[in-house]
């Protein structure tokens, strides 16, 4: 389908081509099915493609229309949570942190109600909420979000997955910013251990994690 093709183009970073694919999909869906989940999906994809091209003013009404359409179809559908999460990430990119926090919280609450508090789909939104909290200077809240994300990743993917390393690294950052270097150090050691085992010594992220560990060791 054109929606699937559009998402494959997004994954390749071909945002202009993805925009065109989603525009064609949107035109077809509006004509054939009208206000429908497929139409909302095309709107969300188009909004993401526009956002990636930094066309935020054009993307926002696409997100809004997709959200209104999906809420009319089923206000508790997980796609509503997906649209909210996408919109929240865009607000964060724009520095609209209070709006980002509110929208991301709504996404999280809907997902928790539909799939449960430990489902893998919650991890990304929890991470985004943590990042927003860090930028707002709310380090304790950020730490809680990142720890929940870590717990979900460990349960879903196992203790040595790269996403576990990302979550641990995020937690360690909040600890360092709170002056808790002794608490951060074992986490950064574990991050490097996971990276070496899962993505290899030569990966760029492994080098970055090694640098991060050295930073803590120097500051002790």
Image (spheres, rainbow, N blue to C red):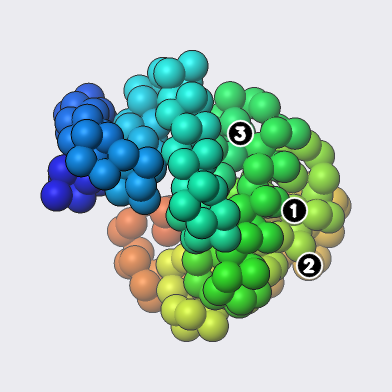
Placement of the C terminus among the 4 image quadrants: bottom right
Residue ID at (22%, 45%) = 3
Q: Is residue 161 above or below residue 44?
A: below
The picture quadrant where one finds residue 49 is: top left
| Residue beneath disc 3 | 92
Per the image, label 2 sits on a secondary structure element best described as helix
- The x, y position of residue 91, in whole percent, is 59, 31
- Residues marked 2 and 1 touching at CB (< 8 Å): no
Mark 1 and mark 3: span between their CA atoms? 14 Å
- The x, y position of residue 200, in whole percent, is 33, 67
| Residue beneath disc 2 | 183
Nearer-the-camera pick, 4 or 213: 4
Mark 2 residue crowding within 10 angstroms, few (<14) / some (14–19) / many (20+)? few
Left or right? Give the position of 55 relative to 116. left
- Residues marked 1 and 3 touching at CB (< 8 Å): no
Mark 3 residue crowding within 10 angstroms, few (<14) / some (14–19) / many (20+)? many
Mark 1 residue crowding within 10 angstroms, few (<14) / some (14–19) / many (20+)? many
- The x, y position of residue 14, in whole percent, is 20, 33
The picture quadrant where one finds residue 39 is: top left
* Circle number at residue 142: 1
Task: Tell which tag, 2 or 3, sits nearer the viewer.
Answer: 3
Left or right? Give the position of 39 relative to 218. left
Q: Earlier in the sequence, mark 2 or mark 3?
A: 3
Mark 2 and mark 3: span between their CA atoms? 28 Å
Residue ID at (48%, 24%) = 61
Residue ID at (14%, 49%) = 1
Per the image, label 3 sits on a secondary structure element best described as helix
Q: Is residue 13 visible?
A: no
Q: Is residue 205 above or below residue 39?
A: below
Q: Earlier in the sequence, mark 1 or mark 3?
A: 3
Q: Earlier in the sequence, mark 2 or mark 1?
A: 1
């Amino acid at each position: 389908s054109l929606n699937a093709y559009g998402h494959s183009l997004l994954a390749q970073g071909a945002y202009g081509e993805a925009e065109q694919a989603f525009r064609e999909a949107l035109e077809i869906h509006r004509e054939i099915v009208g206000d429908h989940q497929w139409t909302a999906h095309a709107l969300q994809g188009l909004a993401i493609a526009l956002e990636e091209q930094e066309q935020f003013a054009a993307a926002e009404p696409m997100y809004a229309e997709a959200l209104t359409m999906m809420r009319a179809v089923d206000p508790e559908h997980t796609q509503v949570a997906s649209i909210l999460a996408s919109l929240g990430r865009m607000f964060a990119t724009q520095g609209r942190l209070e709006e980002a926090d509110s929208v991301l919280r709504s996404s999280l609450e809907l997902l928790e109600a539909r799939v449960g508090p430990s489902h893998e789909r919650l991890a990304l939104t929890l991470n985004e909420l943590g990042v927003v909290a860090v930028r707002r200077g709310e380090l304790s809240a950020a730490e809680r979000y990142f720890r929940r994300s870590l717990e979900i990743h460990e349960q879903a993917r196992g203790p040595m997955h790269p996403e576990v390393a990302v979550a641990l690294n995020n937690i360690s950052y909040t600890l360092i910013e709170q002056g808790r270097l002794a608490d951060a150090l074992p986490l950064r050691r574990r991050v490097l251990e996971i990276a070496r085992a899962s993505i290899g010594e030569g990966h760029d992220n492994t080098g970055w994690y090694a640098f991060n560990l050295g930073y803590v060791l120097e500051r002790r």
